[in-house]
Amino acid sequence: TNAWATGQWDITQLNHPTSCLLLTAAIAIKLGLVPFHFWFPEVLQGSPLMTALLLSTLMKFPPLTLLLMTSKSLNPALLTTMALASAALGGWMGLNQTQTRKILAFSSISHLGWIAIILVYSPKLALLTFYLYTIMTSAVFMALNKIKALNMSMVLTSWTKTPVLNATLMLMLLSLAGLPPLTG
């Protein structure tokens, strides 16, 4: 629609409101932002841990890059609303889960909501936040893969087999939860 309305094929200079809305919605679907988040927890739950790791980290990089490139021409009110809803809903929905992949899916929704909020004000800080999220999430998925834990009760019972890995996993989970001395 932007090419029809303005003759511009460059997506970094969107001028038409419909183009801005469609691009914002498309990026929100790929990032799993609210209200387009419903697919993400179910896909992560049905995937092996290493596939879920790729979906939670590497597959978020292209849409986030596109969001960084086009952030000046997107609707900031719409993006902020979706981001705030994602941060809140991701945190609330994750509280009731016992499956590790669903917990990490809702954590991802919440983190990407915070990243989208930060992006409106400071794109460089948003990129740093995404890098920290990627490192911590990768470490959690690799630790869960090592101890073969599918739910939180399996994490708790594997404490005797790998105490150092479980202690590290708990610190990483606390970091993803956003406790102050940690990076989350």
Image (cartoon, rainbow, N blue to C red):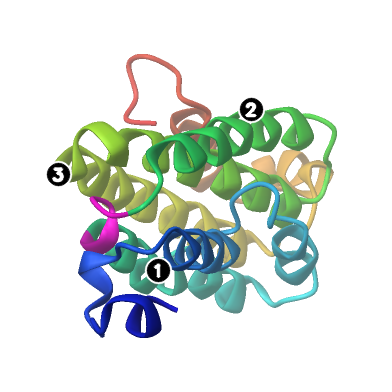
- Crowding near the residue tagged with mark 3, few <14, some 14–19, many ≥20 C-alpha atoms within 10 Å: few
In this view, the residue farthest toward the left is: 124
User: x%, y% of residue 125?
Assistant: 19, 38
User: x%, y% of residue 115?
Assistant: 38, 41
Q: Earlier in the sequence, mark 2 or mark 1?
A: 1
Q: Is residue 164 visible?
A: no
In-image side of 142 versus 7 (left or right): right
Which labelled disc corresponds to residue 88? 2
* Magenta-drawn stretch contains 165: no
User: x%, y% of residue 120?
Assistant: 30, 37
Judged from the image, the secondary structure of the residue bearing numbered disc 1 is: helix
In this view, the residue farthest toward the top is: 180
Give the residue at mark 1: 63
Most frequent secondary structure within the magenta stretch: loop
Amino acid beneath label 2: Ala
Query: Which of the pair 33/142 is nearer the observer?
Result: 33
**What residue span does the magenta drawing correspond to?**
69-73
Give the residue at mark 3: 124
